[in-house]
Amino acid sequence: MLAGACVLRVSQLHWLRRRIHQEKKLRMQISPEITDPVSDGGSASTALPEPAVIDLPEAAPWTGNWSHLITAWLFGTIVLAGLVVFIMHFGTIEVFVAKLRGANPLWLAAALSCQLATYVSAAAVWFRVLKRAGSPVPFRSLLRLAFVELFANQAVPTGGLSGSVMVVRGLMRRGIASAVAVTALFIAALSYYAAYFAVGLLAFVLLWHSGDLDAAWRALFIAFAFVISALGMALWFLSRSGDDLIPAAIQRWRPFAQLARMLSQVRVDLLRDPPLIFEAATLQSGIFLLDAATLWCTGRAVGLNVDVGSIFMSFILASVVATLSPIPLGLGSFEGTCTGLLHLMGGGLEASLAATLILRGLTLWLPMLPGLAMIRREATKPLAIGNAAA
């Protein structure tokens, strides 16, 4: 899955570069006087073009591959069903069903509130970056994009970038300049990796403190730290160096030329703003903490008596396993790891499985239909070009 995610990252960066190039070309066609400083009588024209709209249905990073995505979901669902049957071989199905039926509605409402708060935190990341760039967007509009972002990250796991690219598409459709949108993408991705590394490190420290950090977990930590650090550092150097990092000789190859042109659009002043990066990373960390709080609430709803630290550790480590797993959507790998860790920390097997499945229902299955509809809407709506200056 990680190799595929890296390939998708490159294709998504190329997609953003094509959007910028198409905007420039369209503005030149609509208002050639902008590119020609001398018009009738030799005077410079200052007329601005009217906002134009262009329909670019191919702009979605994976439009046209819905059949593959649905196939992956079905495969993951089969794996998840097999896992549930396997776990119930060691538990009691009657107790498991009773836990689900007897779930406390107040705690379920609290879990749902935590999930709603994750959308607010995700929207706040983009809101702060855009405000700092001088291109504010109404927070309510960003909330819709945040829903798309978090659902896309769950449905199309690419280390957090699939949802970010969808948000960039939405920002450009709302008239945000390409340079600002691309810069916001880099900041969102960098802050996501920083937050993921921080909470992941904390989870492994808690596991070590509990005395359960064996050789397998140490190997997993090394793999996680290497992948997240490599991706984060690669984005950091690319974003801060612009197109200077890519030699002119290599830029003769089309993919590298596209990447160089896209990097030239990045607002380096925003990337060199430590308070902004720290604020974005803090908000990204809040999303992880709210997801862990959701698991704690679902656990309380089914009578799972596990402390908050163990809940946090179980959720983050399960997320790490799902990230590194080749199984689509992490289905089965996340549930199995989370259930096993909760049970290891003293929770009943049936209650641990019930709490984990309710969490996944709130984060993945419940938002699926509205998430697909909103992704489709953001992917096919016309792109506003009027003030999307590169």
Image: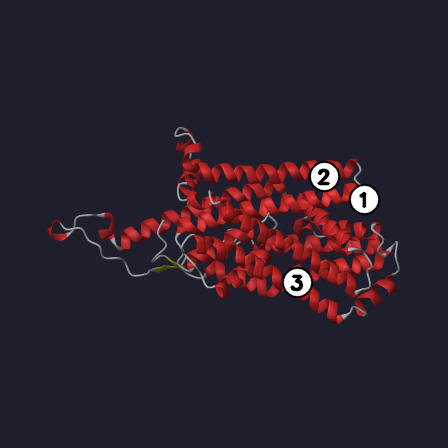
Asked if 377 appears above or below 8 in the picture, the reply is below
Q: What residue is at 68 percent from the left and 62 percent from the top?
A: 362
Q: Which mark is residue 210?
A: 1
Of circles 2 and 1, the one toward us is 1
Outermost residue on the left side: it is 41
Which label is found at residue 114? 3
- In three-dimensional space, the C-alpha distance between marks 2 and 3, rounded to whole angstroms, equals 28 Å
Q: Secondary structure at mark 1?
A: loop
| In front of the other: 323 or 180 | 180
Dot 2 corresponds to which residue? 220
Q: Measured along the vertical axis of the image, is residue 169 above or below residue 251?
A: below
Which amino acid does the dot numbered 2 rest on? Leu
Q: Residue furthest top?
A: 249
Residue 266: x and y, percent?
A: 42, 44
The front one of 12 and 292 is 292
User: 10 Å neighbourhood of mark 3: few (<14), some, or many (≥20)?
Assistant: many
Q: CA distance from mark 2 to mark 1?
A: 17 Å
| Amino acid type at mark 1 | Ser
